[in-house]
Amino acid sequence: QVQLVESGGGLVQPGGSLRLSCAAPESGFSFGNMGWHRQAPGKQRELVAVITKGGSTDYADFVKGRFTISRDNTRNTVYLQMNSLKPEDTAVYYCYALWEVSWAYSEDCWGQGTQVTVSS
């Protein structure tokens, strides 16, 4: 199973910003949809944002206008720019990618998770 490599989490004050990154462990992958999910303590994992290979994006209502997802297909990397952070954004953030193994088979890949804590 392929694990994506995440970076960029940390502690930030309310109203602050963080940028998360997530990349394939090595070159040679072809990814379809990529995205970010999050899981807060005691809650289910939820979708935050998704981006297609062509660059179309979609966001959960609770981050619209504050978060921006982007990707670099040449680097097999997806980013999440998080602005105007709120305490309720505190969670472990997981990146996701659909690995296009062949024309007939795709495989879900996940990152290890990175903690984002929004607190004064």
Image: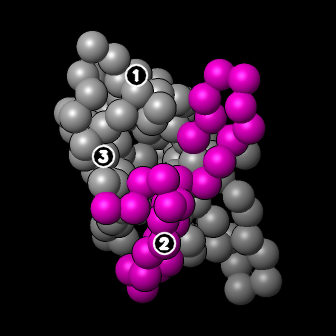
- Assess whether residue 8 is covered by the magenta stretch: no
Residue 41, given in percent of the width and then of the height, sits at 65, 22
Q: Which mark is residue 58?
A: 2
Q: CA distance from mark 2 to mark 1?
A: 23 Å
* Mark 1: amino acid: Thr
Q: As drawn, is 87 to the left or to the right of 17?
A: right
Q: Residue at x 51, y 37 (%)?
A: 93
* Mark 3: amino acid: Met
Mark 3 = which residue?
82
Q: Is residue 49 visible?
A: yes
Name the foreground residue: 5 vs 15. Answer: 15
* Mark 2: amino acid: Asp
> Farthest residue in the left direction?
16
Q: How many marks?
A: 3
Provide the residue span drawn in magenta.
38-65
Of callouts 1 and 3, the N-terminal one: 3
Q: CA distance from mark 3 to mark 2?
A: 15 Å
Residue 33, given in percent of the width and then of the height, sits at 56, 71
- Assess whether residue 53 is covered by the magenta stretch: yes
Q: Quadrant of residue 86?
A: top left
From what the image shows, is residue 32 above or below residue 116?
below
Q: Is residue 2 visible?
A: no
Given contact means CB atoms under 8 Å apart, are the residues at marks 3 and 2 in contact? no
Tag 3, which secondary structure? strand
Residue 46, given in percent of the width and then of the height, sits at 65, 48
Name the foreground residue: 84 vs 33. Answer: 84
